[in-house]
Image (spheres, rainbow, N blue to C red):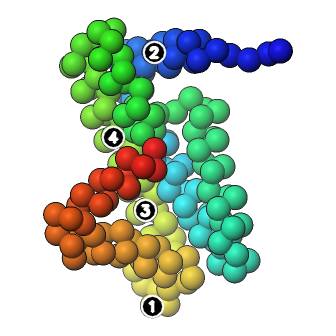
Amino acid sequence: MDYISPKEVAGVMMNTAVYKSSLPIKDLLIRGALSGALLAISVTLALLATAQTGLGLVGAFVFPVGFVIIVILGLELVTGSFSLVPLAWFEGKINFKAMANNLFWVFLGNLLGSVLFAILFWAASTETGQASQLGNIEHSLILISEKKTLGYGDHGAAGLFAAFVKAILCN
């Protein structure tokens, strides 16, 4: 029977964490930016699939393709770094500076990539703000964004805590 033992999985995770923490800043930013952009593209494609079919399930099938591409290309997604790199620090395989460096630069790369895609999507879908009509995808993006920000903001600290807990649970 072919299988990998939990001990082997943990060893691979630790090796991956050490490797991630040793990448140069340039690599973290490039890999992070590509991941952020790919994830943003996945959201847009999932909303497009949902809008065209009227079935949320179709969008749910489309969205994970972005994650698969990120894994296949060996890119850096901040959630992966958040889950793996601190383990290497806890085990004493890397120092705190290496861990903090990785988490910061991957987060920044993800943010830059997703914001760049958002700007490009805005420019294309609104003709750089000249189009007066929003499509289904744009309308969906606005509604989702409002719900994920204003909805939590209305509840103050409790809303912030709820968003934090949901972020943990989604990983």
Mark 2 or mark 1: name the one nearer the start of the chain. Answer: 2
Element at label 1: loop
Question: Label 4 amino acid?
Answer: Phe
**Residue at image mark 3:** 118
Mark 2 or mark 3: name the one nearer the start of the chain. Answer: 2
Question: Label 1 amino acid?
Answer: Ser
Q: Are marks 2 and 1 in contact (CB under 8 Å)?
A: no
- Residue at horizontal 42%, vertical 84%? 130
Q: Are marks 1 and 4 in contact (CB under 8 Å)?
A: no
Question: Label 2 amino acid?
Answer: Met
**Residue at image mark 1:** 132
The residues tagged by marks 3 and 4 sit, at their Cα atoms, a distance apart of 16 Å
Mark 3 or mark 4: name the one nearer the start of the chain. Answer: 4
Q: Position of residue 101 (x, y in %)?
A: 26, 26
Element at label 4: helix
Q: Position of residue 132 (x, y in %)?
A: 45, 90
Q: Position of residue 13 (x, y in %)?
A: 50, 19
Residue 37 visible in this rendered orientation of the protein: yes
